[in-house]
Amino acid sequence: MLHSGLLRGPGGTPPAEGSRALDWPLGMRQLLAATRDPRLQAYYRAGAPEGSTPLHEAPLMALDVETTGLDPERDGILSIGLVPMSLSRIRSSQARHWLLKPRLPLSSASVAFHGITHAHIRHAPDLLDVLEEVLGMMAGHVMVVHCREIERQFLRAAVSSRVGEGVQFPVIDTMALEARLHRQPQPWQWLPRWLHRPAPPVSIRLAASRDRYGLPRYRLHHALTDALATAELLQAQVAHRFTPDTPLSALWS
C-alpha cells in the first residue's frame, strides 16, 4: 500500500521516514496521472525502482541544492548539483552543476555564506529555464541527500511557484542514517545525566559525519562538492553499517 502521506495532490507532502510500506513505483504512477506539466510527466513516467531492489543494484543520484536562506517559501535556490553514483562508483564525469538566478535579490548573509555574488548570477538562468534538464537527469533515480527537508521542500516550493505544482521524489538521507545511530538513546546515557554533566550531542552535519568515517575534508556549501561529499558518505555508511544487499525500503523515504 502507498503511504497515506505520499499524495496530497501533485505538490503534496512526502512520506515520513521509517515507513516500510512505501511504494514509490505506485506513487510515481499516481503522480503521473495527476500532473499536467509535460516536464513533470516525463519525470514521473520514468518511475522508481522497487523497494526490494538491493542497494548495489539501485540507480542512485546524489543531490544538493544551495539556497539563499532556510525558508523555502521566501528564499530561493542558488545552485543545484547532481552526481550519478552507485555503491561502487561515483560518476564524476557525468555530474552536473547549475548556477541559478533566484527571483529575489541576494542578501549580504547569503553572499558571505556561499561566496556567490550578484555578479556571478547576473546572467544565470531561472530554474524554469533548466527544469527539463534537471528533472531529466533525476528521472528514474533515488536521490541521495544530506538533510532531505532542504532538497525536498526547496525543490517542491520552487517548482510549484513556476509551474503550479510541486515535485516529489524518493530519497536516501545520509543525515537521517547518522541520526539512527547517534541520536537514539543508549543504555549508558543515564550516567552523564545522573552526574549532571550532559554529554554534548553528536553532530550529524555533513562534515562531522564524514570525519567519523575518515573521509577527506572538502570546502562545503558548493552544490556540486556537497553532492559528491554526500555520495561518498553513503558509500562509507553502507560499507560500515549495512550491506550491498540491503533493500532500498530499509533506507529510503
Image (cartoon, helix red, strand yellow):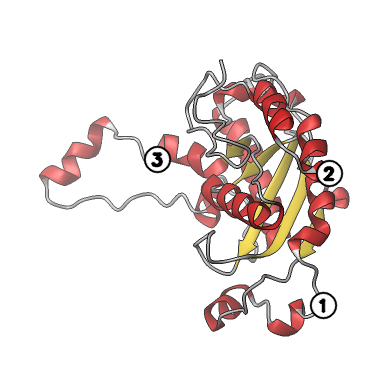
Residue 101's place in the image compared with 156, above or below, is below
Amino acid type assigned to the residue bearing label 3 in the image: His
Asked if the residue under mark 3 is in contact with the one under mark 1, i.e. CB atoms within 8 Å, the reply is no
Relative side of 88 to 76, left or right: right
Screen quadrant of the C terminus: top right
* Circle 3: element type: helix
Tell me the CA gap for discs 2 and 1: 23 Å
- The local crowd at label 2, few if under 14, some if 14 to 19, many if 20 or more residues have their Cα within 10 Å, is some
Q: Where residue 250 appears, x then y in whole percent?
A: 55, 23
Tell me the CA gap for discs 3 and 2: 36 Å
Q: Where residue 190 appears, x then y in whole percent?
A: 18, 38
* Circle 2: element type: helix
Name the foreground residue: 46 vs 86.
Answer: 46
Q: Quadrant of residue 22?
A: top right
Residue pointed to by mark 2: 136
Residue pointed to by mark 3: 182
Residue pointed to by mark 1: 123
Screen quadrant of the N terminus: top right
Amino acid type assigned to the residue bearing label 1 in the image: His
Name the foreground residue: 162 vs 98.
Answer: 162
